Image (cartoon, coloured by chain):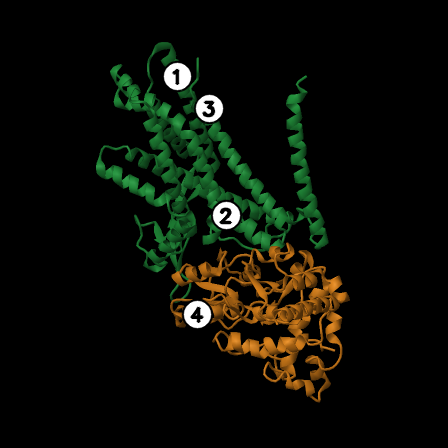
Amino acid sequence: MNFKKILPQLLTLVVVILVFGFFSYNAQVNMENRGITFGYGFLSQESSFDVQFSLIEYDGSHSYFRAYLVGLLNTILVSVIGIVFATIIGVVVGIARLSNNYLIERTAAIYVEFFRNIPLLLQIFFWYFAALRALPLPEKADPIFGVFFLTIKGFFVPAFVWNNLDIFIYSVIAAIISIVFVRLYAKKKQENQGIQTPVLSISIGLLIILPLLSFLLGGVNASVEIPVIEQLSQTSFTFKGGLKLPPELISLALALSLYTATFIAECVRAGVQGVSKGQKEAAASIGLTPNQVLKLVVMPQALRIIIPPTTNQYLNLTKNSSLAAAIAYPDLVLVFAGTALMQTGRAIEIVSITMLTYLTLSITISIFMNWYNKKIAIKEK
Amino acid sequence: MFKLVKRLTSVVAMFAVLFTFTTETMAAKKSKTLKNTQKKGFVRCGVSQGLPGFSNADAAGNWTGVDVDVCRAVAAAVLGDASKVKFTPLSAKERFTALTSNEIDILSRNTTWTLSRDADIGLTFVGVNFYDGQGFMVRKNSGISSVNDFKAGVSACTNLGTTTELNMRDFFNSKGIKYEPVTFEKADEVVAAYDAGRCDTYTTDKSGLAAQRIKLSNPDDHMVLPETISKEPLGPVVRQGDSVWEDIVRWSLNTMIEAEEYGVTSANADMMKTSDNPAVKRLVGAEGELGAALGLDNEWSLRIIKQVGNYGESYKRNIADTGILPDRGPNQLWTKGGILYVPPAR
């Protein structure tokens, strides 16, 4: 019986429970003394405030819970956009830093040193107010390709109006599933017969043909709605129709990706430099092409070094997106921990929900990245 | 000689200690906040992060404004010195938590008195020191001259976490107009975004609009629409559950208003002790025992009037003379056509 081993852990558990118990008891007593009631019933009440930008249908007649979802989805939206762009910029800059071309290498280095050494909040303010100052008023905006309008009131883009959208989505899902099967088949074929299959071109073909069939046979059709300028008063205009991306979203996503990309660039550089030169030379000597060297030898080893610190950067980006409140982007903190908290006065309830939400978001990203990390880790045989 | 001075100071100190013990009356024993304030030697007051006319700090860190004067009045009444106030600038979002969690003792931060705030979240509103209402600011060249000129698609900049957000929705909904609310955490960003052209209109309390207009790059290009879309009675707030402290803050404010009503100013307060009017004599503490009921001495109200001035003086100094709202509008005494009306101090 290894009671001795369990005892310290049990004691730790007891201490943790006691500490939590003390704090919640303390909060309870103090709230009671001050006549503050506690409960989550408010979540189903009518919120009676509007939000500028939301991915789901929402207005003040919906519940506080719906407002929470609006904020959460906006947080996820800006985080996903930020992560995608930060990764792309980060990889490009990271590789540029390894370039033999002096100009490219220096430019990348200056970019990294500049953007990672300025506080993020300042950068967000800079991009937001710089954008507001630089962008034209709606009536003065020049169309980009005739249909896009970048103005101070937002980026107006054409929107698709779908018929039978669900059939189109099914066709895309079907394409993805068949691609997975093709890949499995190709892998097996290579292992058994040593013959390589052009998986990439087949995948792209499938992704084009299946959705195309849904248009021809499934009765799917889409029309494009182009934004049209509309006059609000003598001197003020806006666009109607189409899709609108608010300037707050654009500048926040821009600031987050430019800032986080600097850290990812350094991770990429470290990863590639971490693969020993001998590996590349050995790969070249057995007749692999430069592309194959990168794809089959360098990247798999570099990724092992890149993934763990990059996970941290993804988590940072998601958490940093809460700075949105400063520039009026309606994220979770602004909508829920801001307006909803103020209107209900339920500080403890709302802050705890918000904290749990960020925790869940971060842990989800963490779990996914850990899974990916495990997948690419060295498998000792 | 030196020894004598030393002995004298110790005697004085002893008397001072005795004095503090005797002034700690029943009321003080009942009020934790009053006791703590007297022990600390200053009043902890929550104010805005900078709203000219209401609570605004100058370059040297001196706070001025009508909201600030309420806290100063309480300090004059309780501690005998209007300057013994520690100001904590708070955002709209932080203000109630700061009060309920005991960081401050008075919240005097252009806060609207509503039922849910008063009843639900452990706060008590003690009175109204400014009757306000929500309005809209637009560019003069926009051709908008009334709230009826707004069209669907209008974007409105405002502050986060205020009654403004709710009123705005009620207003636009009643007109059937779809609008775009752009809400910022701090007022400075609201002004900057509106100034840059992000929004067609800037909406908040009319006093706030008047004060913030000065910060725009070309104040003369903007105007406040005549309509008022809501009632916004602004006033000081205290924690629920300390009724003595609540009374002190309420009657400090009432004293300022009543002093104006009876023509008692910081300049003539001392002379008013010999007034023929018993109401005036009560107000300056020359008659009656009103201070004792609050756990204070009888000169408390005289100190408020002498050190801070009456409501009219405070309004003139902070709001009228600074050009924010020269016209007192509803914030005029009831005897002069306004709605300032306080219960009698007797």
**From the viewer's perspective, is the residue at label 2 or at label 4 nearer?**
4
Eyeballing the image, is A277 above or below B53?
Answer: above
Q: Circle 1 sits on which residue? A: A187
The label number, if any, that marks residue A374 in the structure image: 3
Query: Where residue B6 sits in the image (x, y, percent)?
Result: 63, 68
Q: Would residue A227 be visible to someone looking at this image?
A: no
Amino acid identity at mark 2: Asp
User: Would you say the residues marked 4 and 3 are in contact, meaning their CB atoms lie under 8 Å apart?
Assistant: no
SS type, badge 3 = helix
Q: Please name the residue shown 68% across and 37% down the image.
A: A18
Query: Where residue B93 sits in the image (x, y, percent)?
Result: 56, 56
Amino acid identity at mark 3: Lys
Relative placement, left or right, of B237 versus B171 is: right
Q: Circle 2 sits on which residue? A: A331
Query: Where residue A239 sits in the image (x, y, percent)?
Result: 40, 55
Other-residue count near label 2 (Cα within 10 Å), few / some / many at <14 / 14–19 / ≥20 = many
Q: Circle 4 sits on which residue? A: B214
Q: CA distance from mark 2 to mark 4?
A: 31 Å
Other-residue count near label 3 (Cα within 10 Å), few / some / many at <14 / 14–19 / ≥20 = few
Other-residue count near label 1 (Cα within 10 Å), few / some / many at <14 / 14–19 / ≥20 = some
Amino acid identity at mark 4: Ile
The label number, if any, that marks residue B200 in the structure image: none
The green-tinted chain is A
**Near-viewer residue (A104 or B142):** A104
SS type, badge 4 = loop
Amino acid identity at mark 1: Lys
**From the viewer's perspective, is the residue at label 4 or at label 1 nearer?**
4
